[in-house]
Amino acid sequence: MPASRSLASISAASLVLALSACASSSSERLQPTSEAGYPRTIDNCGRQVTIEAPPRRAVSLNQGSTEILLSLGLADRMVGTATWTDPVRENLKVDNAKVERLADNAPSYERVLEAEPDLVTASFASTLGEGGVTTPDALERLGVPSYLSPAECAKDNEGDDDGSRDAPLGIETIYQEVQELAEIFGAEAEGQALVDDLTARMEAAAAQAPEDEVSVLFWFANSESPYLAGCCGAPGIISRTLGLKNVFDDTQAEWPQANWETVAQRDPDVLVIGDLTRKSQTAETAAAKIAYLESHPVTREMTAVEERRYITLTGAAMNPSIRTVDGVEQVAEGLRELGLSE
């Protein structure tokens, strides 16, 4: 489930002051320098985004985007991160510690402007879009380019839910995000190396797919009205790669909410459970989810609960990001440990 839509707000007066201050400082600081290959323009979700020079003060508004930038070795060109569901990936801890965290959840627009960014990136339109922290148009008026994950481009984000997809998201779109961010920063070689590594890992994980069909359910968060994966988001990448049957693949909603009676009727073989460290919904951790499942009068009768067939994933692995590849590997390993694959 992407970022919460309950975002911090600031008064109109303070926003005007913040905009004025940022515009003034940005106009002084963001004078383009002569750099080979710049300016360069990228088509991002139908917007033409022009980068005048390699960014030096990037702000990433979501964990997924942050971890791509860190994986490209760009920590020294970042001045802020925000909206985390989980601890940073272990191999990125040292670099992540060098970058200021503006907020654990969504920051205010004012806080973003205080960082004086020359680029703002995000994983979700609910963060960088109408009703989010800010919009690409608002940043563009200040001379600050922005980049939204292409995983959001083909998604219908209308309404108050987490959106829906007409077509399944593919891992190639995540590779595209890596390569486009690398291009923005002039780090194409690092981007290709990262994509090559992710591709090899996906191929190795796919080779571990079970021979027989296994049905699964992906539960992100919330115990009263759980957010469960539909057909076509990041969990769909995991399911298709490993040949699994998602019991809610009949809905194109990204994270539909259902009642537990419906879940029990579909009775999946395995429950893939989000293990989150944030504090936004009920039943964030895997331990809280499992305790709920084993005490609820309906869910405790499910086959997967009776057999304790649980696989835990970080929230980041269940969102479109390079961590989705971690998710494929972890589900493959979990199925093997449960005796459902070789």
Image (cartoon, grey):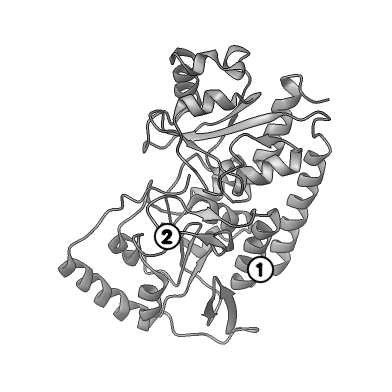
Q: Spot the residue most to the left.
A: 13
Relative image position of residue 141 (x, y in whole percent): 36, 80
Residue 85: x %, y % from top left: 46, 42
Q: Residues within 10 Å of mark 2 (few under 14, many from 20)?
A: few
Tell me the SS state at disc 2: loop
Residue 152 coordinates in the image, percent (x, y): 53, 60
Find numbered disc 1 in the image and state the secondary structure of the residue it sits on.
loop
Please name whichever residue, 39 or 227, is drawn nearer the observer in this view of the structure: 227
Residues packed near mark 1 inside 10 Å, few (<14), some (14 to 19) or many (20 plus): some
Q: Residue 93 occupies which quadrant of the picture?
A: top right
Amino acid type at mark 1: Ala
Q: Position of residue 236 (x, y in %)?
A: 64, 45
In the picture, measured across the screen, residue 146 lies left or right of residue 72, that is left
Query: What residue lies at 80% left-to-right and 26% top-to-bottom?
Result: 341
Q: Is residue 189 above or below residue 284?
A: below
- Which of these two is toward me, 15 or 79? 15
In the foreground, 172 or 293: 293
Q: Left of 192 or right of it: where is 12?
A: left
**Outermost residue toward the bottom in this view:** 34
Screen quadrant of the C terminus: top right
Q: Residue at x 72, y 43 (%)?
A: 240
Disc with the residue nearer the chain's start (1 vs 2): 2
The residue that label 2 is drawn on is 158
- The alpha-carbon separation of the residues under discs 1 and 2 comes to 34 Å
Report the residue marked by disc 1: 187
Residue drawn at the location 20% of the way across and 72% of the way down:
17
| Residue 276 shows up from this direction | no
Question: Which of pointers 1 and 2 indicates the residue nearer the eye?
Answer: 2
Could you tell me if residue 108 is visible in this image? yes
Q: Residue at x 31, y 65 (%)?
A: 114
